[in-house]
Structure formats: structure tokens, C-alpha cells
Amino acid sequence: MSVIKSISVGDGDMFYIKHESSNFTIIDCNLDDFNKEEIVKEIKNESKDKDIIRFISTHPDDDHIHGLTYLDEQIGILNFYCVKNKATKSEETDDFKKYCELRDSSEKAYYIYRNCSRCWMNKNDKEKDYGSSGIFILWPITDNNDFKEELENVKDGKSPNNISPIIKYTLKNGVTILWFGDLENEFMEKIKDVIELPKADIIFAPHHGRNSGTIPKEWMESIDPKIVIIGEAPSEKINYLSEYNTITQNTAGDIILDCETKKVDFYVSNEKYSVNYLDDEDNASIDNAHYIGTLNL
């Protein structure tokens, strides 16, 4: 069993995966003075029995690295995963400086790219049985010209949205989930024929579900998701994807995916939120989260 939580942090992203192995993964962060103590306390508690804790940074925009300095102070980030880049900013926040420090660290940084492999991320270590996390990187292809152009753009201080990786998480005999960071539609259209994406049960919509992050039709047909989770963005900018089953974080609040063999139980922090496409297995609420149904795979 594994637990995935999409934390409601306003206009930004933050996730964690409590793996069935001895691993714990954090993807992005958006912490402020109102939520940082509570969220980091939860992360410490949920990861306390894990041997490997990794932080995956999709890209260095403030709504994905805000509070990184505080998080590092509190948990000590030893495994920092990111796309290799030389992003700059005209105005450097403390959190961006921390990002650069971790990104450029010879001891803490691990650069991710399509089909990269690492012990405990997606393969086992015979000597230390921490288990695999089931995390695979589908993009970037580092010698792709469109990607290299984006690397030059971020080096010049332009938006880093399109250096975001595509991350796949797979639970053995269970769910498959995709993350896209803040990839933009125009860029995805450029690379849609370069890679073929696998089927996935659940996806987190790119760019918080904005119209600007709409996934190309060809990819959506290939992925064929059972559920699309739409992040927090201004409602007038969201593509609500009416042709798909969705969960919208703006109204659902925190979203918890309790992943087991052949099923996922869904919980949200808004007790008034509901959907009509999940199976009702009459589960009790957990950790101040309201059960809204089960996806049987």
C-alpha cells in the first residue's frame, strides 16, 4: 500500500508519496507562514520510519519552490532530484538561491531524464533492501532540440515551465499516475510526436489545470486516464475537461489517494465535496479527510 497526498497550498503545487517500500518522496513545495509548520510537521511524521527521503523539483518557479529554504532547514534535503539546468532569475529569492545550491550540489543533486535509473528510485539495491519507489521519468530527452532551446531560455532568465519533467509513478499490481509539472500546451504540441505516453489511471493536469497547460489530444487518447486531478488556479483560467472524470482541488481541498492492489480510495478535506463516478465502499474518514469513493482498477 502507498499513500499519495496532493496538498492544498493555494496557487501552487505540493505532493508527497508515502511508498510501500522504505521510501518517501516529496514533489515540489509551496509553503508560507500560514501553512509551513503544519505541513512540515505532517511530512516529518509520515516519513519518520522511512530510510530514503527524496525531493523532486519539477522547475524553479516560486509557486513550486516557495518555502524550500524552510523545508531544507527542517528535514535536511539529502536527495534533490531535478532536470539539469542553469536557470537564472532577474530577482533571486532566498528559495531560488536554495534551489540553485541544491541543484548544483555534487553530493545532493541527482539529474533526471527519460529512462534514468537509480537505486531505490526505480530499482532495488542488493545490499540495502530499501525497495524501489516505482518512479520513472518519461521526459526530458536531453538531446531534443526543443528541450535544449528551453534550457537556453531559462539560462537567460525566461520562464522555466517547459523544463518540467514528466514523472510516472507505478504501484505493483496497482495504480499508475502521471505528473507534468507546469508544461505548457504550445511546448507539448511540439514534442507530442517525439514520445508516446503510456496508459495511466490518474493524471495531475499540467500547469494546475490551466488552459495554457492543456494536454494534446493525441497524448490524452494514449493515456486514457480514468481521473484527471485539476490543481488550484483562478477558475476563469481552468480547463475543466468536461469529457473526463475530474477532481478539482480548488473545491476539494487536500486530496489523499490511498493506493492498494487494484484499487485507490479517495479522500478530500472538504467534507461537502463529492463525485458520482467512484464506487462507494463505505470507508470511514481518515485524518480529517472525507471519503468520496473508490476507483477499482
Image: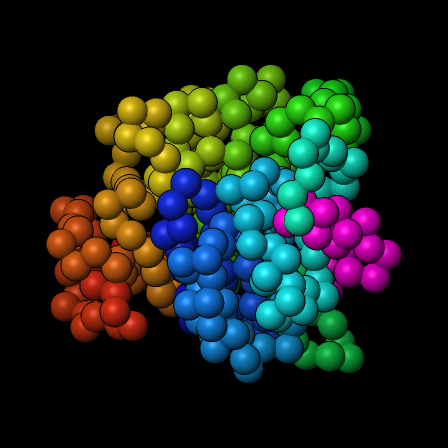
Judge by depth and name the residue closer to the eye, 239 or 131.
Answer: 239
| Colouring style | rainbow
Q: Which image quadrant for residue 26?
A: bottom right
Q: Which image quadrant for residue 250?
A: top left
Q: Which part of the image, by quadrant, shows the N terminus? A: bottom left
Image check: 216 left or right of 87? left
Residue most extreme to the right: 106
Q: Is 217 situated above or below 119?
A: above
Q: Which part of the image, by quadrant, shows the C terminus? A: bottom left
Judge by depth and name the residue closer to the eye, 95 or 272.
Answer: 95
Could you tell me if residue 288 is visible in this image?
A: yes
Q: Looking at the picture, how far across and down is residue 208, in whole percent?
A: 42, 37
- For image coordinates 21% across by 70% down, the residue present is 285
Q: Is residue 181 magenta?
A: no
The magenta segment is 95-119
Q: Is 280 situated above or below 87?
A: below
Could you tell me if residue 137 is visible in this image?
A: no
Marks counted in the figure total: 0
- For image coordinates 48% across by 77% down, the residue present is 45
- For image coordinates 26% across by 39% down, the residue present is 245
Q: Looking at the picture, how far across and down is residue 5, in whole percent?
A: 41, 59
Q: Looking at the picture, how far across and down is residue 44, in whole percent?
A: 52, 74
- For image coordinates 62% across by 27% down, the residue present is 159
Q: Is 11 situated above or below 283?
A: above
Image check: 44 left or right of 257? right
Q: Which image quadrant for residue 124?
A: bottom right
Image check: 129 left or right of 10? right
Judge by depth and name the residue closer to the eye, 56 or 200.
Answer: 56
Q: Looking at the picture, how far across and down is residue 151, in whole percent?
A: 74, 28
Q: Is residue 105 magenta?
A: yes
